[in-house]
Image (tube, rainbow, N blue to C red):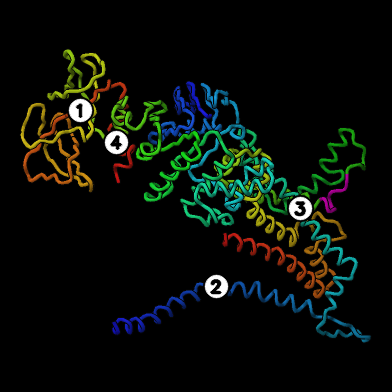
Amino acid sequence: MAEVELRNVSKVYKDTVAVDDVSLHIRDREFVALLGPSGCGKTTTLRMLAGFIRPDGGQILIDGHDVTDLPPERRPTAMVFQSYALWPHMTVADNVAFGLRLRKLARNVVEERTARMLDVVGLPGVTKRYPSQLSGGQQQRVALARALVLGPKILLLDEPLSNLDAKLRVRMRDEIRRIQQELQITTVYVTHDQEEALTMADRIAVMNKGVLQQVGDALDIYDRPATAFVADFIGSSNLLSGTLRVAGASAVAEVGTARVPVDADGLADGTAVTVSARPEDMEVLRAPAADAFALEDARLVNFGAYKRLLGRHPAFGQLEARVPKSFRLDNAPVYVRFTRARAFASDEAPADITDKAARDPARNR
Amino acid sequence: MAVVTSARAVVRPRRLDRSRAAGVLLVLPSLLYLTLFVFIPVIKAITTSFTVRDRDDAGNYTYRVGLDNYAQLATSETLRANVIFTVLIAVTSVAIVFCIAYVIALALRFGRGPSARFLGRIYIVPLFIPSVIASYAMITFLANHGFVDGILQALGLPDGVFPKIVFDWKGIVITQVWLSLPFMTVLLSSVLLEISDSLIESARDVGASSWQIFRHIVLPLSAPGALIGVTFMFLGVIGGFTVPYLLGPNAPQMLGVSMVYYMTNYFEPYIASTQAVAIFLLSLVAAVYYVRQQFKREVR
């Protein structure tokens, strides 16, 4: 049993609120990813869990025990640092064994547990080497072994893969997930990479500007984003701002002169809304139709497995639709129809919502 | 293919020659400097130290090669005492400076708050005061019936109780400590700054106490840099003249002072040179150690 509960946790630096009233329950053996852009408070939250930062408000409970005031050395947590933080003057074995030796365990116990843990992380036979003689991926594994060898209740990982190249990152992703499953350890994983979060975590907690936006599994977060921020941050979305018009069971958003049918989730008529629609929820037509909008300056971007159709519409600005890789423009007009769009009250949308590039490095690759 | 190779064969040596000539030209000034001001004097000192001057019954001097000067250095009560005194002063000063500087550097690295910041500003002051000035300041400050003694006597300390510091080994050590502290602190601070916070946090995370972090992480990680500082300071104290000349006792003397006396007062350039070689050999021990540390660092 090892569950974590954050109760209304806050942290304020001078006059910026790094973490704002975050409450989160992490279940036993669960793998939760804290996902958000840099400066969203995810690392601060993790460091509060580890005990390196004291919250200004709220409580942190591990298995029901209040650990808010305990220093890191007295918490049942183990952390893997972004830069690995291996001690350069110790060999791999000494790095892993350090915590065990501090506990004055018998020598053969230390050796046996060190060897077993290096085995678990897939690094046997490098015990006598120094960290500087290892590759980035190997150092990552040593850091993992060092954290796990003490048998912590909670494993905390702070962007552990950000210093690795793309290929290795994908491999270590699976590897970390495998080890987590094998040891059945409750894990909190901080990342700004949505792909990591979506592929590794049981549940994802999306943060922005210190505020927890949504907690849910990959499908929830992708298909039923709770805020316009989540809709934009996870995957990519066409974002439009307009006014909601509700008529009975159906709702449309007025965007300039255009009207887009939307899911409005109980928002009132006349609300200023941000409309979000995924590129794959845009139907592409070759002839005019009801609710379809003509695209100007249409062009295609090839992503290998699929293509993206980009174009402009006078009312919406830039629009994006996902099309099959066989799709061709052939200089003919194209039209798009919103098959599924969601409206969020505009005050939920952060001011910098159109600043996509900064928040989604994966899309720029 | 053959044409290309032969063309290369013609071009390459010329280029190499030119760059080699440029290299020699670049090295030449420092080589010249070293030869004139280091190699020649060192060789001269060494040859002089092996020169023995004898005086026959008629009062004429004869010269020969021999180890007599070294024998005298080893057997003469005074000279042997000087060598031991020099080493002891150097070791004591370095040990004291190292301990104080390490504590200050730790406070600067890990300390928060106004006192650490204040310390960070003032520790550097002695670096800007020449050793002659500092030595005279110490004399007026610490002499019997000096500034400190005066204050203590005004507070009720009987006359003659204040220990003899000036013209004693204590005076040399205190002044050397005072003068070398900033340099050692700067060096140790930069060494400690190189240790990233995450290395310390990760040690806390696996359960290490402050002492254990110091003992197992901070101390070993700072050791190579710290030992380089120790080497340099050791060299400085071993060959120092101003401080022991102004503050030291008449006997035993540090080698730098004793050498000057033998040279100018006793007209014994042979013994003086022998003492110079002794200083040089002592420095060599430190230098060899320094080079070995550097080499180890590069291997890592």
**Could you tell me the amino acid type at mark 3?**
Ser
Residue B139 percent across, percent down from the top left: 80, 49
Q: Which residue is mark 4?
A: A235
**Could you tell me the amino acid type at mark 1?**
Arg
Residue in front for this viewpoint, A90 or A113: A113
The region drawn magenta spans B163-170
- In this rendering, the answer to whether A26 lies above or below A334 is above
Residue A358 percent across, percent down from the top left: 33, 38
Q: Would you say residue A152 sits in the magenta stretch? A: no
Q: Are marks 3 and 4 in contact (CB under 8 Å)?
A: no
Foreground disc of the pair 3, 1: 1
Disc 4: host chain: A
CA gap between label 1 and label 2 equals 79 Å
Residue in front for this viewpoint, A102 or B177: A102
Q: Residue at x 70, y 63 (%)?
A: B286
Mark 3 residue crowding within 10 angstroms, few (<14) / some (14–19) / many (20+):
many
